[in-house]
Amino acid sequence: MRNKNNTAVASAACVEVQTTAGTQVPVSAAIVVVVVLLLTTALTARGMAVQAVVTTLATAGLLGIELVRRLVEALTTRRTR
């Protein structure tokens, strides 16, 4: 986003990270990355195989995405009626 003076303005939903100049990452994406890393570390530290951890988290992520999509669809169709 840019203001009238053509300078970059940080959005409230983004955090600034050290990548390239002016690159911003959405807060929700940063939180997801941190949670996945913490879960991976915790499950591996408790003795679970790394392949099983990756499979479990990938499956949970896909199921979570589908759950959110169907929930949004169900809530939006009921409101329009």
Image (cartoon, rainbow, N blue to C red):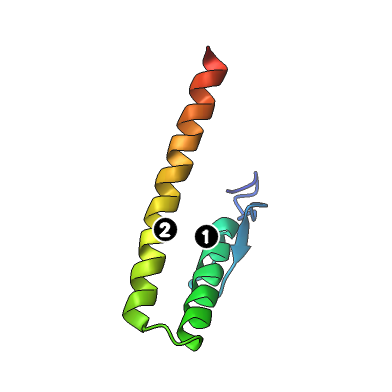
Looking at this view, name the residue that lies furthest to the front.
47
Relative placement, left or right, of 69 versus 52 is right
Figure label count: 2
Closer to the N terminus: mark 2 or mark 1?
Answer: 1
Q: At x 53% / y 81%, what residue is drawn? A: 42
Q: Nearer the viewer, residue 7 or 75?
A: 75
> Could you tell me residue 76's position as x and y percent?
52, 25
> Circle 1 is placed at which residue position?
29
Quadrant in which residue 54 is drawn: bottom left
Q: Secondary structure at mark 2?
A: helix
> Could you tell me residue 53's position as x and y percent?
39, 75
Q: CA distance from mark 2 to mark 1?
A: 13 Å
Up/down of 49 relative to 18, above or below: below
> Could you tell me residue 29's position as x and y percent?
52, 60
> Circle 2 is placed at which residue position?
61
Relative placement, left or right, of 13 versus 68 is right
Q: Nearer the viewer, residue 74 or 33?
A: 74
